[in-house]
Image: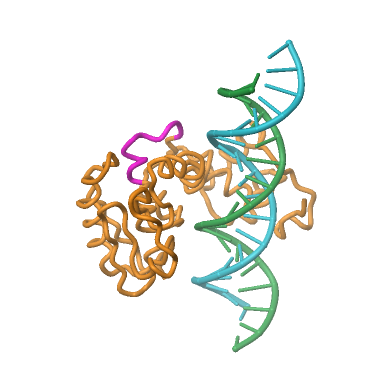
Chain colours: A orange, B cyan, C green
Amino acid sequence: MRRPACCDKVVLNRGAWSKEEDQKLIHYINKHGEGCWRTLPRAAGLLRCGKSCRLRWINYLRPDLKRGNFAEDEEDLIIKLHALLGNRWSLIAGRLPGRTDNEVKNYWNSHLRKKLMNKGIDLNNHRLTRNNPPLTSSGSSGSSSYNGLKVTNNDNSVRNNEPITNKSNSDDRVSEAASGLDEEDSFCLPDLNIDLTVSSEIIA
DNA sequence: AAGAAGTGCAACCGCCGACGG
DNA sequence: GCCGTCGGCGGTTGCACTTCT
């Protein structure tokens, strides 16, 4: 395999992290805090690239990580947020305290996708497909729906799985999501009343 | 018991946007 | 405006582990 660009100059460790490496990284970040991932490995005495350190810290070593199985309400929230945001895992994970984008993404790909497919829900538009055949991409442009939920899309930013990128009205959409999901079929979601306000820096 | 197939998840890859020179 | 660097993101891969045959 090719080494990443950031690792070209030195022969660096790859693959699974050892306990010793973890300890070095934890110790360094506890002492100096996060920041400048490029120089961190050398400063911490690690033969890793900065990206690898960042990933390891964010996805595995951070003290505030929850780990373990996803609760049912977390699952529901992921599904609902995915209906609204698409594959924007970092945004979805941001709504799940103690969860990482990688964790959410893995959980979606390994559990939730199958679960929704078994329920006959189209993963592209979160519609039931048993009685309503999946829409073609052209047919679903401009809006997405999830069971009874209709996610409006005034700026055409939501196409199939594409996320909402406009801050305006996002709260309204989520209110609809929270109120419109629990009526059809056996697929029920609680009224979570999510605040999906996202800073304009993130959206832009 | 053993090999095959399936599953879950940590880690890597490549791309993109922000930023500074 | 261009270029290089950096951090961050989503997609993908590799492999250990589990389940099935």
The image quadrant of residue A186 is top left
Q: Does the magenta stretch include residue A72?
A: yes
Q: Which segment is the magenta one?
A: A67-77
Name the residue located 37 percent from the left edge and 40 percent from the top edge: A75
The image quadrant of residue A13 is top right
Q: Number of labelled discs?
A: 0
Q: Is residue A41 magenta?
A: no
| Position of residue A76 in the picture relative to residue A184 (left or right) | right
Name the residue located 41 percent from the left edge and 66 percent from the top edge: A159
Across and down, in percent, residue A180 comes to 22, 52
Instruction: Tell me the quadrant of the picture where the C terminus of chain A can be found.
Output: bottom left
Of residues A162 and A18, which is closer to you in this image? A162
Could one spot residue A154 in this view of the protein? yes
Of residues C9 and A38, which is closer to you in this image? C9
Could one spot residue A42 in this view of the protein? no
| Position of residue A196 in the picture relative to residue A13 (left or right) | left
Q: Is residue A147 above or below residue A19?
A: below
Across and down, in percent, residue A193 comes to 22, 50
Name the residue located 35 percent from the left edge and 40 percent from the top edge: A74
